[in-house]
Amino acid sequence: MTDPSQTTIMIVEDEPDTAEMFAEMIRLSGYRIIKSYGGSAAIGLLEREKPDALILDLMMPDVSGIDVLRYIRQKPGLENIPVIVVSAKSMPSDIKDGLNAGASIYLTKPVAFLDLIKAIEKSLDGSK
């Protein structure tokens, strides 16, 4: 089991209130948080910080979450970071697209606290 206090989770979400809600959920479990309010900012931040896992929204105004996900999966050094997509896009085709682009887990909004934490734990256990 990974020690949460030594584990960094990056949240990529263009809605600050939603990002803070996720951050608070994750902080309660002891993880360190980094937030990014958009896809292009996330790509820049990923170059400096290498999080242990990523919570990623798909619908963002600048660079879509799918494009961020594709970037991560093609970038040496980032390609193995578990990515948990949390999106309002809930059609089976949306979920399939997210998983095909490289999402480790796909959750739909609204997401329950326990579901989010379980997804983080599962993705981290799978990445070791």
Image (spheres, helix red, strand yellow):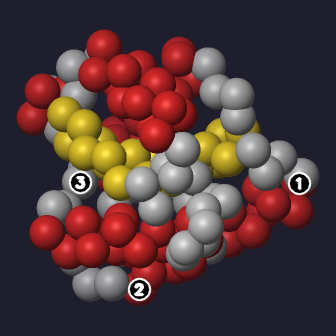
For the residue carrying disc 3, how many other residues have a C-alpha within 10 Å: few (<14), some (14-19), or many (20+)?
A: some
Q: Is residue 122 visible?
A: no
Indicate which disc residue 74 carries: 2
Q: Residue at x 10, y 35 (%)?
A: 6
Q: Residue at x 34, y 73 (%)?
A: 43
Q: Which residue is mark 1?
A: 92
Looking at the rendered image, the quarter that the N terminus falls into is top left
User: In the visual, does 39 lie left or right of 44?
Assistant: right
User: In the visual, does 101 lie left or right of 118?
Assistant: right
Q: Are marks 1 and 2 in contact (CB under 8 Å)?
A: no
Q: Residue at x 19, y 34 (%)?
A: 32
Residue 93, image quadrant: bottom right
Q: Amino acid at mark 1?
A: Pro
Q: Tell me the CA gap for discs 1 and 2.
A: 25 Å
Q: Which residue is mark 3?
A: 51
Q: Position of residue 39 (x, y in %)?
A: 46, 68
